[in-house]
């Protein structure tokens, strides 16, 4: 058994975000992204999740974060209302 047999898509995405120097993600959890939320939880020492109340807020916060820090802004959510 190799180390890659139990890797999930959510883990690959989380590692890619870390490779891109993303250290903060704004978002709203939901059933459709539970796997990704678990991937973020396992990496909480390297990537911070900031809970928002609305999906749109996550997008606005990620945009403002990118504009004011010069870093890549990231957000995650399930489908909005």
Image (cartoon, rainbow, N blue to C red):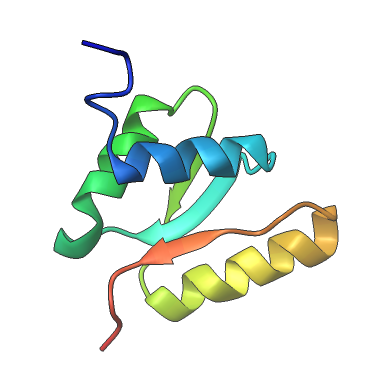
Q: Which residue is drawn at 23% across and 46% down?
A: 35
Could you tell me if residue 76 is visible in this image? yes
Q: Is residue 5 left or right of residue 47?
A: left
- Residue 41 in the image: state x and y as whole percent: 33, 33
- Residue 9 in the image: state x and y as whole percent: 32, 45
* In the image, farthest residue toward the front: 1
Could you tell me if residue 52 is visible in this image? no
Q: Is residue 68 left or right of residue 57?
A: right
- Residue 15 in the image: state x and y as whole percent: 50, 35
* In the image, farthest residue toward the top: 1
- Above or below residue 11? Residue 36 is below
- Above or below residue 66? Residue 59 is below
Label tally:
0
Q: Which residue is drawn at 59% across and 36% down?
A: 18
- Residue 6 in the image: state x and y as whole percent: 22, 25
Quadrant housing the N terminus? top left
- Above or below residue 45? Residue 64 is below
* In the image, farthest residue toward the left: 31
Q: Is residue 73 left or right of residue 9?
A: right
Q: Which residue is drawn at 49% across and 22% down?
A: 45
Quadrant housing the C terminus? bottom left
- Residue 19 figure quarter: top right
Q: Residue at x 28, y 79 (%)?
A: 79
């Amino acid at each position: 058994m190799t180390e890659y047999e139990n890797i999930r898509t959510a883990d690959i995405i989380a590692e890619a975000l870390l490779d891109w120097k993303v250290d903060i993600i704004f978002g709203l959890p939901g059933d459709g992204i539970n796997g990704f939320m678990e991937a973020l939880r396992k990496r909480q020492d390297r990537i911070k999740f900031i809970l928002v109340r609305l999906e749109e807020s996550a997008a606005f916060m990620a945009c403002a974060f990118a504009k004011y820090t010069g870093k890549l802004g990231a957000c995650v959510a399930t489908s909005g209302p």
